[in-house]
Amino acid sequence: MMDRIRIVGGRPLKGTIPISGAKNATLPLMIASLLSEETLTLDNVPRLADVSLLQRILGNHGVDVTVSGKRAGETADHGQTLRLSAERIVDTTAPYELVSKMRASFWVIAPLIARMGEARVSMPGGCAIGTRPVDLLIMAVERLGARIEIDGGYVVAKAPKGLRGAEIVFPKVTVGGTHTAMMAASLANGTTVIENAAREPEIVDVAECLNKMGARISGAGTQQIVIEGVARLGGARHAVLPDRIETGTYAMAVAMAGGEIFLQNGRPHLLQAALDVLNQTGVTVSPTKEGIRVARNGAELAPVEVTTAPFPAFPTDLQAQLMALMTRARGTSRIVETVFENRFMHVQELVRLGARIHLEGERATIEGVERLKGAQVMATDLRASVSLVIAALAAEGETIVNRVYHLDRGFERVEDKLARCGAAIERLPG
Ligand code: UD1
């Protein structure tokens, strides 16, 4: 739990990095298994702490989860296969001890209310990045006919006669809200129209899987999603799409360290906005059929101005990594974070490495410096921790990243993937 990562900066990266299945698709896909009595088989599932934790949470509701062993010729680079069977739901309560550890587990409210007519789910509570409320998720199930009460920190939802289709208009784009509405509406009676839906690729992936299970969803990936409710959903087999955030993170790592990396299975159209920004910095990005090649050979990094926003704009989940990269640009960069308030915890730690960053509300101004210098750092969220790894790759001397737990929640074998490309990086078991 208290592992640390040691990095000695200054080495260029060269080689291939295999991109894992997307964490942010895996979690809602696993939750979708609650919608059916039959087995949902998921391929290309990443080995992450968040996936193991969600296995425990779903187990608590009665979902039987089995992980297939490796088949002949498979390595750790192949994702896992998970079989999830929710034949019988034994408990419709998601307790505080579990939900407070992972916000996305709140989303079980949708399949539980849709299939069982009741759900009792703890409010997620405090979180390192901003307030992150769940009011819009509650609004969505309420619109579908659930009665909602808040009782002792729990959201209690009841719909004894089942849910009915409705129009759900989100005043703000929310990924979790869209997943929740889509899952609940799949088993509602009648048609649901979601307006101002999130367009993230993970929404499209979940919609495709739900349709394989027998749902009737159209328009996923656009601002309007239409769902014709069905009486029941069946089993299916689905491979999780590649992780666009992991892809963008390693693209920034090679931009920082220099060298040339092939991001195997990376799909350019999933992160075009980020690749465009990298192009502006002077990095060479070449999409191929099998992945994306990223190179920086000696050239300086040009500064950029970037505003985070929902897909297809530049993702908030790559903001910290881009900021790490810009600490070494020649000139002044500006980043505006519009998705989450307070998503700047990495700033103080980057400053410990010698970065010059000025914060004003949702705006960060980054003045590129000639050199960063290794130090002890830590981070309290997962994107922030990986930004420290990126900075360390270009810092002189040794950097120790503490609290690696956050990294393990969302990035599969970071130290392995980078070490194989020549980085001086190792895990120090705690
Ligand atoms: C998901 C991603 C996360 C990513 C985020 C934004 C997963 C598991 N997590 O989180 O990595 O950073 O999308 O791309 O997929 N909001 C409300 N009320 C609500 C819900 C959200 O005000 O009921 C606000 C949030 O505070 C935030 C904004 O809406 O300011 C977007 O949040 P949302 O898209 O819901 O993020 P998550 O689904 O939690």
Image (cartoon, rainbow, N blue to C red):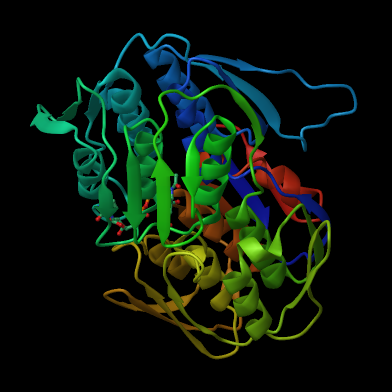
- Quadrant hosting residue 307: bottom left
| Residue 43 can be seen, yes or no | yes
Query: How far from the left and from the top, in percent, is residue 400?
Result: 56, 51
| Residue 177 can be seen, yes or no | no
Q: Residue at 37% across / 60% down in the picture?
A: 345
Nearest the viewer among 289 and 79 is 289
Q: Note whether 385 is above or below 207 in the view shown.
A: below
Give the residue furthest to the bottom. 331
Q: Note whether 105 is above or below 309 in the view shown.
A: above
Query: How far from the left and from the top, in percent, is residue 72?
Result: 89, 22
Give the residue furthest to the front. 190
Is 84 left or right of 122, judged from the image as shown? Answer: right
Image quarter hosting the C terminus: top right
Query: How far from the left and from the top, in percent, is residue 297?
Result: 81, 78
Query: How far from the left and from the top, in percent, is residue 209?
Result: 57, 37
Nearest the viewer among 315 and 302 is 315
Q: Residue at 48% across / 44% down in the picture?
A: 217
- Quadrant hosting residue 184: top left
Is 426 left or right of 339, judged from the image as shown? Answer: right
